[in-house]
Image (cartoon, grey):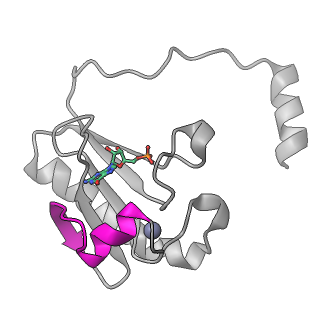
Amino acid sequence: MDNCIFCKIIKGEIPSYKVAETEEAYAFLDIGPLAYGHTLVLPKKHIANIFEADPKDLYPVLDLVQRIAALMKEKLPCDGVNILINNGEAAGQSVMHCHWHLIPRKAGDGYHFPPPGSLSPETAQKILKSLR
Ligand code: 5GP
Ligand code: ZN
């Protein structure tokens, strides 16, 4: 897609610190890292997000996600890895080319998600009625 910054990175029109590349997927360092080694992994094909993806186009990307996560654990100062996709603006997606964030984590690094809520049986039933 012409005006997509990640398509331009994949084509080499915008420079990036490439970590790895396969026929279907591309990985490079995030310019605004949340942690040392923060890497983005994405399909070469322009897919906006999970809502628009054919699962078949995602499988090879997941292969690379898994490979890089393993490499991070082996080669970086890293005890674990958060892997996430922001899907849609409300979920924090700012670049509309589907990408996995791989965020290396160290024990005691201080990052934390909001404190957990508490799931009541009534709420659980209501959600299941919607999703099942
Ligand atoms: P999102 O908010 O869409 O889930 O994530 C977009 C990510 O892309 C952000 O973490 C941001 O730092 C990164 N990013 C945006 N523009 C560029 C760029 O030109 N080069 C690189 N390497 N990363 C970028
Ligand atoms: Zn794109």
Relative side of 66 to 51, left or right: left
Q: Position of residue 34 (x, y in %)?
A: 27, 34
Residue 36 included in the magenta stretch of the image: no
Relative side of 125 to 69, left or right: right
Q: Position of residue 87 (x, y in %)?
A: 57, 49
Location of residue 122 (image quadrant):
top right
Residue sitting at 66 percent across and 60 percent down? Answer: 51
Residue sitting at 32 percent across and 55 percent down? Answer: 40
| Near-viewer residue (68 or 7) | 7
| Near-viewer residue (125 or 92) | 92
Residue sitting at 20 percent across and 37 percent down? Answer: 79
Magenta-tinted stretch: 4-21
| Number of marks | 0
From the viewer's perspective, is residue 38 above or below residue 65?
above
Q: Position of residue 21 (x, y in %)?
A: 24, 75
Is residue 15 in view from this perspective? yes
